[in-house]
Amino acid sequence: MNPTLNTWTWVIWLSSTLVVIWSTRNPIYLGLILLTLICVWLSAATRINKQYPDSRSTIPFSPVRISVFIIFFSAIFNGLISRFGNTPLFYLPEWIPFLGGPVTLEGLAFGVINGMVLSGILIAFMTVNLTLPARSLIRLIPRAFYPLAVVTSIAVTFLPNTTRQVDEIRESQAIRGHRVRGLKDWLPLIMPLLIGGLERAMGLAETMTARGFAGDEGKPLWTRSRVGLVFGLLFLLTGWLFQLIPALQVVGIITSSFGLCLIFYTLWTVGKRVQRSHYRRETWTYLDMFVIIGCALILSIYLLPFLWLDKSSIAYNPYPIITLPQFDILIALASFMLVIPAIKKSNSNSDLHNQIRSDD
Amino acid sequence: MISINNLTFTYPGSNQAAVRDINLEITKGSFTLVVGASGSGKSTLLRCVNGLVPHFSGGILSGEIIVNGLNPVEASPKIMSRHVGFVFQDPESQFILDQVEDEIAFTLENIAMQPEAMHAKVGEILELLDLQNLRNRRIDSLSGGEQQRVAIGTALSLEPSILLLDEPTSQLDPISAQEVLLYIKRLNETLGLTILISEHRIERIISFADNLVYLKKDAAGVINGAPRKIIQMIDLVPPITKLGMALGIKPAPLSIEEKGRITQDYKIHDIQRASNQMRENFESKICLEIQNLQVELGKNIVLRQVNLTLHQGEILALMGPNGSGKTTLLRTIVGFIRQNEGGVYLFGKSTSGMKVAEICRQIGYLPQNPNSLLFSDSVAEELMVTLSNHHPSMDNQALEKARLEVLNTLKRIGLQNQQLAYPRDLSVGQRQRVAIGAVTITSPRILMLDEPTRGLDYAAKDSLAKRLEEWRQAGMAVLLVTHDVELAALVASRVSILDEGKIFACGDPSKILRSSETFTPQIAELFPQTDWLTAQDALSGLRKI
Amino acid sequence: MPSSETSKTNFSSILIYTLSTFIGLMGLLYPLIFPNLMQADFSAQPRTAEMPLMLTLLLAICVIVILYEVQGSSVDAKFVALLGLLVSINAALRFLEVAIPGPGGFSPIFFLIVITGYVFGGRFGFLIGSLTIFVSALVTGGVGPWLPSQMFAAGWAGMSASLCKPVVRAFGNKGRIGEVFILASFGAFWGILYGMVLNLWSWPFISGSAVQFWQPGISWIDTLKRYLVYYLVTSLVWDLARAIGNFIFIMLFGAATLKALRRFKRKFSFQYFPAQSIEMVEDSQN
């Protein structure tokens, strides 16, 4: 399967989506965003189903159903728990602990909004999970974690093998009369699997060693990186604790950001020392460009304080009394920017632009 | 290029040396075949060349090795990987990634080669091994032979001048094996790669080699030299060589092309097989009958109208190309697959409705991978597991009987002295015997074996053939699914060919095994006008001119 | 390695583990411990809305840093191959979750996480725990904001399994059923703790702005009480099922697995240079 978009494009899209969803509590905007996300999901799902009519990608849960489910339960949960709001719908008897008291419309509304936010996040992740095969995601692992990326690759490579082994072992044991009647009977199935896996691991280790993989044995972790991490963590921790106290908020934010940067910088420099290259290179097409531009637009509209745009409609609060949410057409339109990945390519030949093939 | 002096190595925890006092010179560009019985140290020797021994295995090494001017003991496998490539036996545990291209490129990514150079190099290797059409395929979708070619490709990515191969074809069927060996020979000729390959089944490869290294049993030393000279001194030889040596022809012929040396001195006296009489007249009862069996898996018809009978006291060899449905047939007989049409009759009774465990009490089925059976701490325990499975609650009397059964089975498989050994530490042949013991401890009258010769050396194969013949004489019926033509020639009472789900032929081995080139044993190829299949047959049927 | 360097690296690695775990724990617990945030002043809502985000980010940093530390600098083929294969098996077992009848919440992955962490050491334990979660998420398309908390909890389950060693030694149970019992109890304990961590993480998400959970001026003890009720209702049953499942699983399969792993370790931890694969050599002496 060729994802029509570069992996990084999807990451940018996902991050933008999450930021946008989190920044607003306006149910109209949230609703639009949700619709947009469902469109993107649908387009991805139909593409996958066409290419893999029988594979794992037949997602059992449709996002519409999930959203409805989440919104509904969030509404109920919140309605029952919340004690605030000025429009009571009915009263629960006081003797029920923590639940007793008025169930308000505002409470329900807040629950609905919260549900929308959660659904949005979920669907965004579902879409990315659908379009990006495991290998693409592994390729995102930063260089500092290269040994763990190899471990993950090995694990993903050997998964089909492992499931085949389970079937083989099940049959072999059945041949000698083994029947699975209770949990205890799983032992003759698990043990050969485990032992076989250990033996296979050593064979693989031998192959890797013969191909020049091993090296740097016994060298302790680069001291400077350790120091960088320790200080980064200290700054992060103290800064974050500070910013909880209203008076020290700004100081706290600065300190913790500094700590965060230090941590990432340390990891980045460690990565630089790793000598590795990449065989597969993803290409960038014009569609990637559109998506990124779209994300940049929507982020700037939602986040940046443009003076000529009235951004008050973005925040919304059903408390203390529920009101009709404001609506700004420009911001609403901006929300649709997220739909760009759903645009199908007119000719499938452009799929060849992309070198990535998926697993499965 | 490779020079070894007084090499002695002992694995950690072992009190016996794995190889002792090895002295060897391998010249650049030569094709060396390393042979020896199981446990004679072939794998160890190969691993000494690229440093896996002792860096990977631990242990004590003395003596000197120089490879391309480097000492692998001082340098590490990492440095040696630039000079020596290694191909292992088991395709399954050689690959880190799941696509052909990525796997070959992995080693290059490791050394931080520039992407353009990488693409060029990968393209080169793919072309060298004719893998261009497979470059985007998943490795687990390839055949065994193709997988080994990919493994060779990964070993070549750092442009080594030496290629080591540790039994690369032992898990493959004969056709794939031949294909892989031809590629190796081509690499030796076109690239001038020095090849050091260890193999059991040497008849395929002996004509390629210009140097033969024989490791004596129990680390007693090594002989090496031109194949023709050395072959006289060893006992693991192809049938034609065995025949030549038995007839006293010097130097013994190595391959079919040298047939003339035998025929110029010997003429055919009796075209019949030596042991024909034994196999012909069995009027014994039918223990297993398959009638009009039709099996469809998904959209594929795997078995079409298969008819087969198995008699008591006979060994029926079922042969056929990969994917013809042989394993499916066995699995249907045992009850894992329900047939769409037709029936399986065990001693006259239909097996439909019978549970797998029930059927397996009467049919001992040895699957292709016996490792999936073994998990106990000792051989005796392993055998006991089967009995406990069939009789979950045993009182003291039953337990005593069970222990006696275990002892009997141990005797039958010849492992009385290893009853406390950890099964997975035993040799391939011994492990197979433990598995056979585990499935036959219920004293079934029928035994089915699925590709039992995978990974076995000549000695273990001989011992298997002998055992099968013993059991056959004691009345057991054996259904032997195999690629191994020589084994079928040795033991089969009848041969059946299954191709694309249909039985194409069934009957006398002498005729059936001659029906197609793929199934013809060496002796039959040599003497097409006779009924002979084995060296023994030829020996008794030839007379000196 | 010169001994002074060893002690220095050990100290700083402990510092890294402690600091990052503390940060992670802070993230999980601060919605409970800082009710000052929860003002009835509704204009403060945006601050409380950031809690789930903050929490996930902090946990993610924590996991990333610990992963870096446990990865170490050794690129040892044996370690990588062994970890890769075991993660593969464990991830496959996780799919079996569906096949095993029983109350939801039970996950067969903890069995291997606890036992391999115990046999091969804390580093290995953390890695197999977090990577099992990661790999099974990758393959089933379950990557999401819940990953850092799951990886954090499963990782720590494996890392702390090596703490069972002194307990087993104290009771003199090595090689006997007592050892398995201790491991099984440990597994049960983590069955619940894992659930708690997940629950703590999910709570700020589900309760949206936690403002409604408090009334102005209540103390944090009351908050704790309310949270406990929430926990009881939502995840206690699942966590108990997981705990009991882990206990049974380890009791049934622990002995055989320990034997197999120890046999394997004996066979393959031989190194030509003693400095290789520090973890494996260290543990081969235990």
Image (cartoon, rainbow, N blue to C red):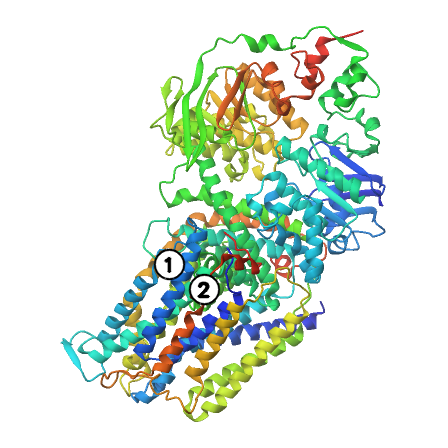
Residue A165 lies left or right of residue B126; in this view the side is left
Q: In the orientation shown, which residue stands out farthest toward the front?
A: A346
Above or below A71: residue B455: above
Residue C243, numbered circle: 1
Residue C142, numbered circle: none
Q: Nearer the viewer, mark 2 or mark 1?
A: 2
Disc 1: CA contacts within 10 A as few (<14), some (14-19) or many (>=20):
many
Along the viewing direction, whichever of B534 and B222 lies nearer the viewer: B534
Q: Quadrant of the N terminus of chain B?
A: top right
Q: Which residue is mark 2?
A: A128
Above or below A241: residue A247: below
Residue type at tag 2: Val
Residue A154 place in picture, x, y as percent: 57, 54
Above or below B27: residue B529: above
Q: Chain of mark 1?
A: C
Q: Chain of mark 2?
A: A
Q: How many marks?
A: 2
Residue B398 place in picture, x, y as percent: 40, 28
Residue C192 visible from this viewpoint: yes
Residue C262 lies left or right of residue A122; in this view the side is right
Along the viewing direction, whichever of A14 and B371 lies nearer the viewer: A14
Residue B496 place in picture, x, y as percent: 53, 20
Along the viewing direction, whichever of B170 and A336 lies nearer the viewer: A336
Q: Quadrant of residue B510?
A: top right
Residue A52 lies left or right of residue B266; in this view the side is left
Residue C115 place in picture, x, y as percent: 49, 55
Residue type at tag 1: Ala
Above or below B206: residue A55: below
